[in-house]
Amino acid sequence: MSLLTQSEVYAEITKAQSEGRRIAVATIVTTSGSTPQRTGAKLLVFEDGKMMGTVGGGCVEADVWTEARDALTENRPRLCRFTLRDAPDVPPDEEGMICGGDMEVFIEVWS
Amino acid sequence: MLTAAEISSSLKRSLEEGRSLAIVSLLERDGKPGLPTARLLVEEGGRMIGGTLGDRALDEIAVRHAIGLFADEKEEISVAKCKELLARFVNDGEDAFDGDEISAYSDARLLFEVSRPPLELIVCGGGHVGQAVARAARFLGFNVTVIDDRADFASREKFPDHAIRLIADDFIEGLRSLKITPACHLVIVTRGHRHDEICLREVIDKPARYIGMIGSRRRATTIREHLRREGIGADLLRRVHAPIGLDIGAQTPEEIGLAILAEIVLSRRGGTGRPKSDEGPMARAR
């Protein structure tokens, strides 16, 4: 899935609002280490759990999705920090496919 | 409080006019995200076109940082603490802000997201060099438009890539039919210096990001003097890259096209144009 542009994101929020639906927008704001995630990448999560865009896929995307659902329930924005490392002692380059590093995600609810 | 619809229409308007737009969000203050999220829209050039971060001084700081992001095309996103930005501005010798004024926001963290308009490249002249420039520009992701007053040059036969827009018309008419924005790069490579000069005169005061014209140094001097006598200021003349292209010893049309695009990349991204190896470890081998 390709990265959403800002124009696409705000058009989608506007559309959801006009239909009376709420939407959570998760944005990767910082990363460190060897994450495959790109800062600025956005994941849109709707009340029914559907998603649009991507923050890089994998297990992290599921975590972000869960946080976004919680943000929707609370109807509040949140800043979440994720550690993308199963075994913190192992340097990232020895983990093969598993990504290492930290990232910070901002989640905002538009209603 | 900006609505999504307002942000959406501002984005559309700015990008259509060829100007970048920064959406600045107040991520957190006192360790907490605000409710609702405060936002400010800053357009390329530094104009605030909507919203506020909740404080005038903070908005001013955001504008200064956004201007730096617009200039540095590598940066699409940036997160910064208010007090760090402030310290940097003071370091850079810019007139300091009143520290008290923003102390309530000094730990605020801001998110800057820059949207840029698609890159446009307009080639005047569909000859061998124009064809090579158009191909090289497509390779680099530009939207390309070619103008030539000869219909058999502004043709699909010469430009088989259907994504290249062709205008077979008088150069002046062709240029006037286009909106020349700050996202535009103009490459003037017509079949003769007379047409080159006509094209340059037409675009020299337009807000294009890059204007380059082919020709020898002598030819460039002649044209400069013509335009100067017509009252065109030195500021406008100095923007023009003429003779066009980076000096890589280019000879064939393809090499010249590469040299021109290399100069355009250099002007966008910054750099020295020198081989990286000049000062590298291999050069210092003993």
Image (cartoon, helix red, strand yellow):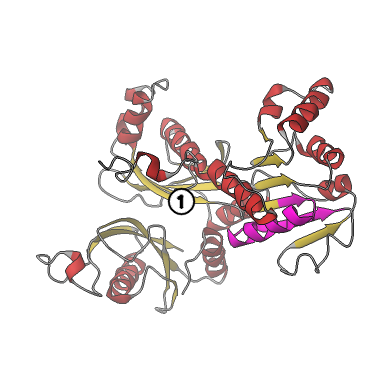
Highlighted magenta segment, given as a residue range: B122-148
Q: Residue under mark 1: which chain is it in?
A: B
| Residue drawn at 76 percent across, 61 percent down | B165
Left/right placement of residue B239 relative to residue B114 reads right
Residue B154 screen position, x and y as percent: 83, 60
Q: Is residue B134 visible?
A: yes
Residue A53 screen position, x and y as percent: 45, 71
Q: Quadrant of residue A64?
A: bottom left
| Residue drawn at 19 percent across, 72 percent down | A95
Q: Mark 1 packing: few (<14 Cα in 10 Å), some, or many (20+)? A: some
Count of marks overlaid on the render: 1
Residue B4 on the magenta segment: no
Left/right placement of residue B161 relative to residue B94 reads right
| Residue drawn at 64 percent across, 61 percent down | B138
Q: Circle 1 is placed at which residue position?
A: B76
Task: Name the amino acid type tagged 1.
Answer: Glu
The one nearer the camera, B240 or A11, is B240
Q: Is residue B42 visible?
A: no
Residue B127 on the magenta segment: yes
Q: Quadrant of residue B242?
A: top right
